[in-house]
Amino acid sequence: MTPAVAGLLAVAGPACPVKAAEPGGLGAYYRQRPAWTACGDGYECADVTVPLDYAKPDGKKIKIALTRLPATGEKIGSLVLNFGGPGGSGVDALRGSGATVSPAVRERFDIVSFDPRGVGGSSPVRCLDTVRQDTYLALDPTPDNRAEAKRADKWDKVFAKSCLAHSGKALLSHVGTVDVAKDMDVLRSALGDQRLNYLGFSYGTYLGSIYADLFPKRIRTMVLDGAEDPSQPAADFYADQDRGFDVATKSFLRNCFRSKDCPFRVHTVKAAMKQLDELYRRADESPLRNDHDGRQVNEAIVRTAVNAAMYQASSWPLLRRALAKAYESGDGTKLLLLADGYNGRMPDGRYDNSLDALMAVNCVDHPEEPCPYWPVKGTRYPKKVTADGAPPIVVVGTTRDPATPYKLAKALAGQLSKGVLLTNDADGHTGYATGSACLDAKVDRYLITAVAPKPSTCTNEKA
């Protein structure tokens, strides 16, 4: 968490009262006010109502689940957070994060997050049951023969058919990011804010940039941390992401070599990468032992565990210990638990709906992705995001970010008409509130004063 930002309280006033017009036929949605009730640990919970299809505002309605921490001092407005995904529950993430933001920001804003439509408490998409999801997540990520490739193709069909059966075509057609951005504008109004304050991480940057392009004059401040480039084709994004995880893994290895419990035989990146590849091949041929339950710890699970640990350098000690167990005795239990956390598998064996929602949103947003059996037609956002007419938007890029490589933050900042790039020289996914007092202070000052920083680079002191 960031330190309090001194000297800001006297200069920060309320959000400028610009009247935002209500889109046609949506007035009742924009005029609603959430009925907040206490839901534990200082949080309040509520929901807002939105149309399933914005082209039919008098048609079916759905509810969007919200949570907030009220401001501790003189309030500027609300700060809306999206923690990423797509498919992540904002309600759970905020309640589990301790607010994410600094005490200075907590003082001036109600901290609000929500479950996007199709996620968590907001008309969740449902696809596979536990047994079939276990099978799907354990599919060989590197098929060695035609039979394995056909099996993966078969399960793509099963996944799509099951989503249609359990969620219905109407919901699946309207879980895309454009609809979520429109929900967020209804939320802005329902919260009583003339202009939006927004902090989005990872996929939350994609959501934020689409919102900015649709509603540029309804923004007060916007921070996009761990940025995606909305103009980038999906195939290019995944190729960049593969390179990003490779860079992050090599950074993990160099860090590992400085630890006494590092399990790699030879302390060079080339040799350690080869030893990791040997583990993947071993798990593909004969799954590792699992003392937790009856599931197999195969190549898919091991790769997921390693990649999951790349999101936060704080997970690296756990990964070192998990790999040591695998190398020493063929025990993959700790690797399985790392993978379960990433995959949304809960201790009782049930899954949250994050994978279901991720597939549903991505197949609508990026129809060029490999979703050949998806039961509804997707629509890619039709143009580059420029957000003409918006105030300065701050984009944060972390130099060794595995999931959203730094080049994407540079691209987004350059694409926006008033993009400001803050560089976080560090490991891990996203930058704010991960250890850089320099970066945190710049973001906090911008959120509170609405005065954008100059483009600059900060070093994460915990790196």
Image (tube, rainbow, N blue to C red):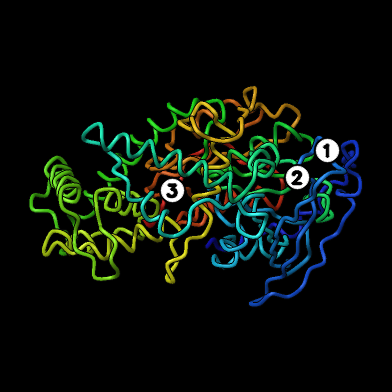
The image position of residue 349, as x and y in percent, is 42, 67
Which numbered disc flags the more N-terminal residue, 3 or 2? 2
The image position of residue 63, as x and y in percent, is 75, 56
Front residue (pair 358, 388): 358
**On residue 56, which mark appears?**
1
Q: How many marks?
A: 3
Q: Are marks 3 and 2 in contact (CB under 8 Å)?
A: no
| Res 317 visible | no
The image position of residue 449, as x and y in percent, is 71, 49
Q: Residue at x 70, y 55 (%)?
A: 79
- The residue carrying mark 3 is 429
Most extreme residue toward the left is: 265
Between the residue at mark 3 and the residue at mark 2, the CA separation in whole angstroms equals 32 Å
- The residue carrying mark 2 is 52
Label 1 element class: loop
Label 3 element class: loop
Label 2 element class: loop
Is 377 located above or below residue 63 in the figure? above
Q: Are marks 1 and 2 in contact (CB under 8 Å)?
A: yes
Q: Residue at x 80, y 47 (%)?
A: 60
- Amino acid, disc 2: Leu
Picture quarter containing residue 370? top left
Is 324 located above or below residue 280 in the figure? below
